[in-house]
């Protein structure tokens, strides 16, 4: 006698007597559309693998491209001007990646060559000065042609948070003395906050494979991060993750993946299971579309969609859905603008996508009218 049961985080189980066997990691995918009619505008076209978008004002932004170029964007006119170029090693997944702004300083995460090695660093620049006054914030982050992490954001506490990948070496993630496979937390000048979970260490959490998204829930201050699951390591695949990040938490890579439960590792809030999303940038939304307000949006690369995740009490995932499946190809970043609309970067010219006419693009999503 068999029965099926939908467990927590959307895992479908087959029950047979007293035995329980997971038969598939199905995700809750309710495709309810918002009551408002959506409008998608093309803000900019003809870009080359844009990676990160940060806002200076309601209609001004800066964005990075993986080849090392930083651009200024006048969104009202759709005008793009080059701010400067960083000397990067743009190979594979490496290059100019994340960006964040604090005051007059632009913070950039990028890969460079040090002899025969690839290394990542974060530096700050005056964004009105042509990127000619670099101040190194942190250096020596393990780099590689894969798994460079790269998202940087300032938190509500004023600290700089940095996602780093394992750089193709899974052992980095569990090594507390390595900055690879971590989320780091620093003061804006690069010094280590006294309340970090590990004394005299920039490490805020560990056990990450390739985290590429960070954002905070406004009403609680909780930090969420997206992370790419395995692509064959140890015979394991998929299991992309959305994690609730706790100070000092260990998220298990490479010991556990996805919904595996094993102490002391922290399981994800949401796993893609057997599906592959390749989640990158993420952003909470508090704009005018009522049905979306408070949701976390995730830009998905291989999955080629924008995923909306409704976060409920606990916190927990109350439901999630795909939006714009395959309409715009690979999506690298999603950010809520100061105008309350969502801005998306496509990534179809990153060597893994199929470029379409006008790629790559910056898109703006809002309510029609």
Image (cartoon, rainbow, N blue to C red):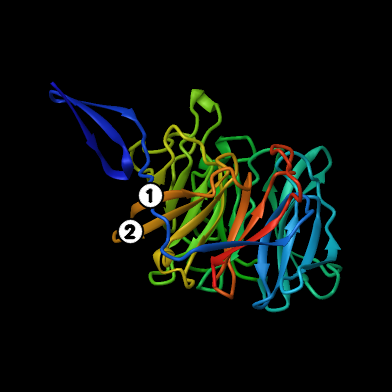
Mark 2 touches mark 1? (CB < 8 Å): yes
Q: Where is 209 relative to 102, above or below?
A: above
**Quarter of the figure with the C terminus:** bottom right
Quarter of the figure with residue 222: bottom left
Q: Secondary structure at mark 2?
A: loop
- Residue 314's x, y, as percent? 29, 59
Q: Secondary structure at mark 1?
A: loop
Q: Which residue is found at the position 65% from the left and 45% from the top?
A: 148
User: Would you call the spot at circle 1 few (<14 residues within 10 Å), some (14-19), or many (20 or more)?
Assistant: many
Q: Where is 232 relative to 180, above or below?
A: above
Instruction: Confirm whether residue 141 shows in the render.
Output: yes
Mark 1 highlights which residue? 269
Mark 2 highlights which residue? 315
Nearer to me, 251 or 325: 325
Q: Which residue is found at the position 47% from the left and 73% from the top?
A: 288
Q: Which residue is found at the position 33% from the left and 38% from the top?
A: 261
User: Would you call the spot at circle 2 few (<14 residues within 10 Å), some (14-19), or many (20 or more)?
Assistant: few
Instruction: Determine which of the numbered discs, if any, sits on residue 230 in the image.
Output: none
**Quarter of the figure with the N terminus:** top left
Q: How many marks?
A: 2
């Amino acid at each position: 006698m068999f029965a099926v049961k939908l467990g927590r985080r959307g895992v479908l189980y087959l029950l047979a007597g007293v035995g329980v066997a997971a038969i598939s990691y199905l995700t809750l995918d309710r495709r309810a559309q918002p009551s408002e009619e959506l409008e998608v505008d093309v803000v900019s076209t003809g870009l080359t693998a844009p990676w990160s978008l940060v806002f200076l004002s309601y209609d001004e932004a800066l964005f990075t491209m993986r080849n090392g170029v930083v651009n200024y964007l006048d969104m009202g006119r759709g005008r793009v001007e080059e701010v400067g170029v960083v000397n990067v090693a743009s190979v594979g997944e490496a290059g100019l990646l994340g960006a964040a702004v604090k005051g007059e300083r632009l913070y950039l995460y990028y890969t460079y060559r040090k002899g025969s090695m690839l290394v990542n660093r974060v530096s700050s620049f005056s964004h009105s000065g042509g990127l000619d006054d670099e101040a190194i914030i942190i250096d020596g982050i393990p780099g590689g042609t894969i798994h460079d992490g790269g998202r940087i954001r300032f938190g509500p506490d004023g600290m700089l948070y940095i996602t780093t990948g394992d750089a193709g070496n899974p052992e980095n993630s569990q090594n507390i003395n390595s900055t690879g496979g971590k989320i780091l937390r620093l003061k804006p000048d690069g010094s280590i906050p006294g309340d970090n979970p590990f004394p005299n260490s920039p490490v805020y959490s560990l056990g990450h494979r390739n985290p590429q998204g960070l954002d905070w829930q406004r009403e609680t201050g909780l930090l969420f991060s997206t992370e790419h699951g395995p692509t064959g390591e140890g015979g394991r695949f998929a299991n992309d993750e959305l994690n609730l990040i706790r100070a000092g938490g260990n998220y298990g890579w490479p010991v556990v993946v996805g919904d595996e439960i094993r102490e002391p590792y922290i399981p994800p809030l949401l796993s893609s299971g057997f599906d592959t999303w390749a989640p990158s940038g993420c952003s909470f939304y508090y704009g005018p579309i009522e049905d979306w307000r408070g949701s976390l949006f995730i830009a998905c690369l291989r999955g080629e969609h924008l995923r909306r995740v409704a976060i409920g009490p606990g916190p927990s995932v109350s439901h999630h859905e795909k939006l714009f499946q395959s309409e715009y190809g690979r999506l690298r970043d999603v950010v809520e603008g100061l105008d309350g609309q969502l801005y998306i970067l496509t990534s179809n010219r990153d060597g893994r996508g199929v470029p379409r006419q006008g790629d790559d693009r910056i898109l703006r999503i809002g309510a029609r009218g």
